[in-house]
Image (cartoon, rainbow, N blue to C red):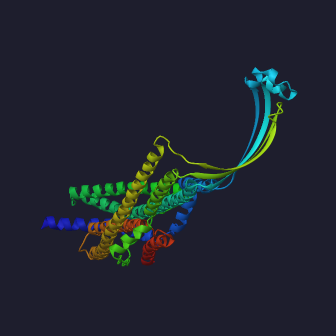
Amino acid sequence: MIHRWVLTGCLAALTTSIQAQPLKIESPVAESESATPAPLPPLSQLVALALSYDSGLQSQRLDSQSVAQEVPMAQAGLRPRLDATAAYRYTDADNIYTDNPGDYPDEVYDDRVSGKTRDTSWELRMTQPLFSLERWRRVGKAQAQMDAATLQVAVAERDLAVKVVETYLDAYQASRKLGLLIAQRESLVLQQRQAQRAYDLGIGDRINLLESRSRLDQAVADQTSAENDLANALSDLERLTGTPLNFDPELVDTPEKLDIAPETRPLESWLAQTQDNVQVLLAAEQQRVAQIDTDVRSATRYPELNLVVGYSDVDSNDALRTSNDLTASIEMNLPIYQGGYTSASIRQGELTAMAGTASVENAQRLAQQEVRKRLRSMQGDLRQIEALQRSVESGSLFLQAAIRGESLGLRDLVDVLDARSSLYDLRIRFIETLCLYLKDRTYLDAAVGQLDTSALTDVANILARVEQASSGRTG
């Protein structure tokens, strides 16, 4: 009986001394939640900044413009070609004139008999292709190459947009997690101080003291990790967009009902939309380029027909060599045998086209697998979000009950602090699961070619609803 009386008196004294301290349980939470959260950086604008700022994407665009020049280069092969040549020629000959000078006594033959001539000449030559199957097919190949280069830019833009969204969500998650961890740490500091006072008064358990210290140290470590994650995410966002951003740590609350509608469309409908995946479109276009290239190689077996018109002017010390000539001709060129080169080249093109067909099938399967994986993940994420919302609601009710019980003397301060710390853990898990769902949603939109401004707006709106719910409750 004496022991129980002493224990009751010590608990009453400990409770009185703790309540007299300036640090209170509600103060850090109330102060943190009273401030209005700063507005989030606009996601769509950040993606637009990244698309205009990223140097890797700029390089892709310049490469695409470079490839586009293949079209006028190929078309030039079908247009007239005009060449001009000029020459100076010195000749020291040994021929019938030099060997028999007596047979050519006329002065006209003097320079020719000497064997030494000096000629100055120039020529204009225009060539117009009349028929060339190879050159016609090269134009089609160049256009296909240009389309493939454009799709390569689209793939790079999609990957960059996904990277910006993912990094944005990492920054948001780290900042909100950091805000919750700061509040949790303050609560754990109070819990550790109470455990220390109870232990110093001889009414506390050393195990409880070590547990409180361990939880506080873990909270410090988690806070440090969240600070590093936030700094890294902000650094990546600045590198991608060229703009320094600020995600202030905020103590967000969990909405009572977030109401994220699950995907009701059948799986077959999603899989059919993978045809719009830019990676699939790129693989198909590259396969088309390979097929046209095979046709170009096959066209080298056909003859070429050209119209050639030329004009030449030769001025020589040998009067017999001086002339002005105008010529016109139709020339046909037919390759007959090149040592097996043409057959090998055609076979090489056919194999490349077959490889392109396999690449299209592989890209299609990867896109469909991505859709299946993301849909499964999103379904699991939504179930977790709903369960965590219920857990947070139950945790909030338990915290209120603990506070009420502590005021009535039915529970002590440890129960209140422990309930508040557990509630912070649930809210952290909710933010992490929500960001994971939004990432899965972004990857799903990218897999079916629907990652556009409306998709980015949907992601931003869900985050805004969480922020509004937090400010609405705290107000």
Quarter of the image with the N terminus is bottom left
Quarter of the image with the C terminus is bottom left
Residue 448 can be seen in this image: no
Q: Residue furthest left?
A: 1
Along the line of sight, which residue is nearer the eye, 119 or 48? 119
Q: Position of residue 307 (x, y in %)?
A: 67, 52
What residue is at 55 percent from the left and 66 percent from the top? 45
Among the 4 quarters of the image, the one containing residue 397: bottom left
Along the line of sight, which residue is nearer the eye, 140 or 185? 140
What residue is at 56 percent from the left and 48 percent from the top? 334
Q: Say above or below: 71 vs 39.
A: above
Among the 4 quarters of the image, the one containing residue 167: bottom left
Q: Say above or below: 442 vs 74.
A: below
Residue 356 can be seen in this image: yes
User: In the visual, does 331 lie left or right of 97?
Assistant: left
Q: Position of residue 147 (x, y in %)?
A: 53, 61
User: In the visual, does 107 lie left or right of 218?
Assistant: right
Q: Residue furthest front?
A: 103
Among the 4 quarters of the image, the one containing residue 425: bottom left
Q: Position of residue 327 (x, y in %)?
A: 74, 47
Along the line of sight, which residue is nearer the eye, 232 or 109? 109
Q: Position of residue 98 (x, y in %)?
A: 77, 22
Q: Say above or below: 374 vs 293.
A: below
